[in-house]
Image (cartoon, helix red, strand yellow):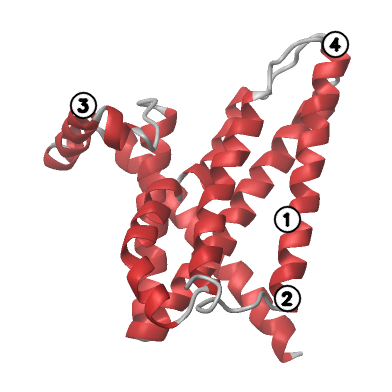
Amino acid sequence: MLLTSALPLSRTRLTLMFVLAASLTLSFLLVVGRVVMTGHLTFLFLLWNLFLAVIPFALSTLLGISKGPLQTRMLVPVGAAWLLFFPNAPYILTDLFHLDSRPGVPLWYDLALILTCAWNGLMLAYASLSDMQRLVQERLGFWAGWGFATVALLLSSFGIYLGRYLRFNSWDVLTNPLTLFYDIVNRILHPFSFPGTWGVTLVFGLFLLVGYGTVRLLGRAQAES
């Protein structure tokens, strides 16, 4: 059924996947190169973060290549999984917090390493969000699509706060739901007691939204030229 209800990947999509794979390979080589130079596994966790960032892109691609009844059946469960893992992609931007002078490797190398990982996370986030926005727009219209994208980015910014400052992970929804639920509800019911929560959510959300809008406009301008 999956084979008969799937669309072939377009040339543009294949090109995008090739470019993203090349960029991810660069990040991988920089991390491995650092391990070889220093003998330490300092930034090896970035490879795990990149793997998590690939998941929402893989899920949106799966929905994009499915069609008809198959896509309809998959939309809610796969879409929910996508929303759960989506914050992992822009989250890598906050790994810039780890930048510091360390012996055995130039600071510029670590800067390039973290920046390439952050860039990949951001591009994977925007690519997968564009896929999901298109699916929503096809069903509910233009403004619903942009409303979905805006809410998704704001929720992802809240997820960034939960991950960076409260150290929750996507799978805590299953493994530690009560603590996660309590911390979320507590911040919603007492917003003025947690200014950092809403500061991070709003500032990162606006940054991600402006960046996403810019990328979309650049793509449209290129198509119209």
* Mark found first going from the N terminus, 2 or 4: 2
User: CB under 8 Å between callouts 4 and 3?
Assistant: no
Q: Which mark is residue 206?
A: none
Mark 2 lies on a secondary structure that is: helix
Is 23 on the left or on the right of 179, as rendered? right
In the figure, 21 relative to 135: above or below?
above
Q: Earlier in the sequence, mark 4 or mark 1?
A: 1
Of callouts 1 and 3, which one flags the residue occurring earlier in the amino acid sequence?
A: 1
| Residue 20: mark in rendering | 1
Q: Residue furthest front?
A: 1
Q: What residue appears at the point 52 percent right and 72 percent down from the top-left corner? A: 64
Image position of 78 (left or right of 216): left
Q: Position of residue 207 (x, y in %)?
A: 51, 54
**Which SS class for mark 3?**
helix
Task: Inspect the image, locate mark 3, and give the three-letter code of the amino acid beneath it.
Answer: Thr
- Between the residue at mark 2 and the residue at mark 4, the CA separation in whole angstroms equals 41 Å
